Every structure is written in structure tokens, then in C-alpha cells.
Amino acid sequence: MNGEPDEDGGGRSPAPVLEARGLCKSFGSVRALIDVNLDLYPGEVLGLMGDNGAGKSTTVKILAGALQPDAGEIRINGRPVSLRGPIDARRAGIETVYQDLAVVPMLDVAENVFLGREVRRRGPLGVLRALDKRTMRRQAAEHLRALNVGIHSVRQRVDTLSGGQRQGVAVGRAVAFGRHIVIMDEPTAALGVRESRRVIELIQLIRRRGLSVILISHNLPQVLEISDRIMVLRNGRRVGVVRTAETDMQQVVRLITGAEVLDQPAAQGSEGWAGGEA
């Protein structure tokens, strides 16, 4: 089971929107990632799973530009990219929703949606450009309404929102500016059942909008429900990629615990780029 999507009607598999080959990262003597390969296809939800210390967070931080790999290459839509920081990742169309959400409680919803991307009015001689709060509030309301995020007003301070609403604001920000990929790190870890269900619905809506999602989670039933494929890391190595429709909870647990290994190091290291380019 190679884990690649089924071929389309034209007899060819779709080209990945994101490809990573041979990612390696060490912290001192600790090898956090060892020759990890990853493919993400258009409109796909890829579940990224593994026990604590498996390498999930390191992989996500490299793809988000927060860490630079010691070796390896990343391509977006077939073109090599250098993600030297989060700004580079954003410019490449990658948005990340971290577990702590990265929202500012004392700011309102609209200010959080446009955090770091504030819209400013034209000032005299191009200086003293004040915030265009009216435009920010209008566009933030449109983004959140399109995602069915239940916010009473974008003028509300974020510290007045529930956990699920805060997650909706963070996801709304990612979808508003993400052109290709949204990475979600444990999006339901601190939420109750009802709010977790809302996040799952948000992920489904993101996929319908044509974005690809990498979902990092310890919640195996949720990953099995929402994902198209599941990639499992163990001790810094990729041990398997399976189609969700063709696997079950028992096999994924075996991969996580090391009782089953689908990827051998030599085979993983030999994977080429889409289209056969070396």
C-alpha cells in the first residue's frame, strides 16, 4: 500500500502541491528527523501521526519556516522553495494554526485575523498610515461568515470568546491568507466534544474550498474520520503512509508503536520527485 491518491479520470495521479524529500534535523546528538519524505496532494487532508518524540512537531516547524532542516528539499507545485522563516512560508502559500492558536486576547477579532498583515490607509506623502479598521472589520466578517464561524461581532475582544470560537478565528485567518496549504497542529486538543465537531466541520469546509490540510493529532478516531491519507512517524523516521479508506485503527496503532513498518529506510530515501525529476 503506497498511500498515493487514486489516479484521476485521465489516467494520471495529480501532482503534489507540496513535496519534501530527505528532511533531516538534529538537535545536538538527538536526531529528530531522519530522511523524511512527505507528499501532499491538492484538496487532501493528510493526517500526521506518531507518539511523543516521533518528529511531528519538527516536521511541522520545518514546513512552517520556523526551523531550517539540516538536509533535504521542499517543493511547492514542483518548484523548490527555501523557507528561511515563517514569512517565507506564508509567501509560499503555507499557513499554520498552532496548538496555542497564536491569537492576542486583548485585541478584537478583526485585529487578530489581520495580525501582522494590517490594512492601512494612504497617509500624507506615504507616511503616518493609520490602520484601516473599517476595511479590516468588513473583510474579517466576510472571511468568518464564509466559514460559518459563529462570532457575534468582529469587534469582540478575543478573550471574551470560547475555545472553539478562538480556534475559528485562527482557522479563519489561515484560510483567508493561505493560498495552498493549511497546517493544523492539534486543533481539538483543548476543546470539548461540541467544539471539536465544529473544528472537524471547518476542516471539511477548507478542503471543499480547494486547500490542502496537514492535520497533526493524537486523536486517532478524528484523524480516521477526516483524513484522506495518514502518514506515521516513529523515532524521527517515516514508517508508513496509508490510505484512510483502506486502513483501520489497529494498523495505525501498529505503525505508531513499531509493531508494523511499511517504509524501509532505503526505499524511502530512493523516492524521486513527481514527474520523475531527480
Image: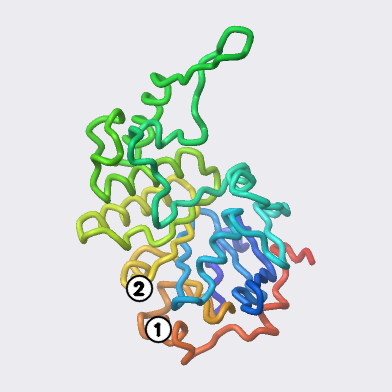
What amino acid is labelled 2 in the image? Leu
At mark 2, the secondary structure is helix
Q: In the image, is residue 248 above or below residue 198? A: below
Residue 16 seen in render = no
Q: In the image, is residue 219 above or below residue 108? A: below
**10 Å crowding of disc 2: few (<14), some (14-19), many (20+):** some
**Residue at 40% of width from left, 36% of height from top?**
112
Residue 129 seen in render = yes
**Residue at 44% of width from left, 78% of height from top?**
51
**Residue at 25% of width from left, 37% of height from top?**
151
Task: Count the marks.
Answer: 2
Which residue is label 2 attached to?
220
Q: Earlier in the sequence, mark 2 or mark 1?
A: 2
Q: Quadrant of residue 34?
A: bottom right
At mark 1, the secondary structure is helix
Which residue is label 1 attached to?
253
What amino acid is labelled 1 in the image? Val
